[in-house]
Image (spheres, rainbow, N blue to C red):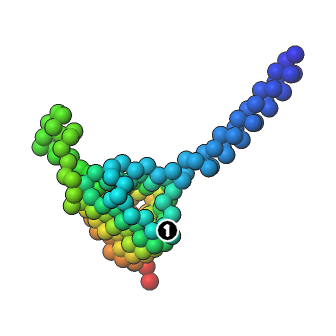
């Protein structure tokens, strides 16, 4: 009887493992999360966004042609007033003026965070885990927290 139990455990473990891998492959890496008014989000048809998080509470986000994101990229237009306290701090935020533009051909690597307002220049590269808190010049590679230009692209 023990051999049957082991066989069944092995079968179900294999089946569930394969099912879970297939589910994750199909669903999680490509499902973006949009917080706020979706009409403020413009994504070019040729862009690849994977499972990005878009916070649109304080501005628009524009993603131009041939931009591509790694996994878990976060774009935040929202902010809160640290001079306010308790519930007032939680609910007060600007409703506009904190736009993010990702220009043509930019590559935003996995786990990068982009804080508004800013513009990521065309064909630039944002390294994995970088924190963008100001404009990124075109044709540059930026890395770090906060991100700094580490290389120019010829």
Q: Which residue is mark 1?
A: 45
Any part of residue 133 in sight: no
In the depicted structure, whether residue 55 falls above or below residue 108: above
Residue 48: horizontal and vertical position, in percent?
51, 63
In the rendered structure, the answer to whether residue 145 lies left or right of residue 107 reads left
Q: Which residue: 86% across, 22% down?
A: 4
In the rendered structure, the answer to whether residue 133 lies left or right of residue 93 reads right
Q: Which residue: 36% across, 48% down?
A: 35
For the residue pair 91 and 149, the one nearer the viewer reads as 91
In the rendered structure, the answer to whether residue 133 lies left or right of residue 85 reads right
Q: Quadrant of residue 5?
A: top right
Dot 1 falls on a residue whose secondary structure is loop
For the residue pair 6 and 54, the one nearer the viewer reads as 54
Residues packed near mark 1 inside 10 Å, few (<14), some (14 to 19) or many (20 plus): few
Image quarter hosting the N terminus? top right
In the rendered structure, the answer to whether residue 13 lies left or right of residue 102 reads right
In the depicted structure, whether residue 44 falls above or below residue 114: below
Any part of residue 81 in sight: yes
For the residue pair 116 and 57, the one nearer the viewer reads as 57
Residue 76: horizontal and vertical position, in percent?
32, 54
Image quarter hosting the C terminus? bottom left
Residue 37: horizontal and vertical position, in percent?
33, 52
Q: Residue furthest left?
A: 83
Q: How many marks?
A: 1
């Amino acid at each position: 009887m023990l051999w049957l139990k082991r066989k069944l455990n092995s079968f179900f473990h294999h089946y569930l493992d394969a099912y879970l891998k297939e589910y994750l492959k199909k669903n999680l890496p490509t499902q973006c999360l949009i917080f706020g008014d979706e009409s403020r989000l413009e994504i070019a048809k040729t862009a690849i966004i994977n499972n990005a998080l878009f916070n649109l509470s304080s501005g628009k986000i524009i993603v131009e042609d041939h931009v591509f994101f790694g996994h878990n990229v976060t774009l935040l237009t929202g902010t809160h007033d640290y001079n306010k306290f308790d519930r007032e701090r939680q609910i007060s935020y600007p409703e506009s003026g904190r736009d993010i533009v990702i220009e043509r051909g930019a590559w935003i690597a996995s786990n990068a965070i982009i804080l508004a307002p800013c513009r990521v220049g065309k064909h630039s590269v944002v390294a994995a885990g970088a924190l963008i808190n100001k404009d990124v010049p075109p044709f540059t590679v930026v890395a770090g927290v906060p991100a700094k230009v580490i290389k120019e692209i010829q």
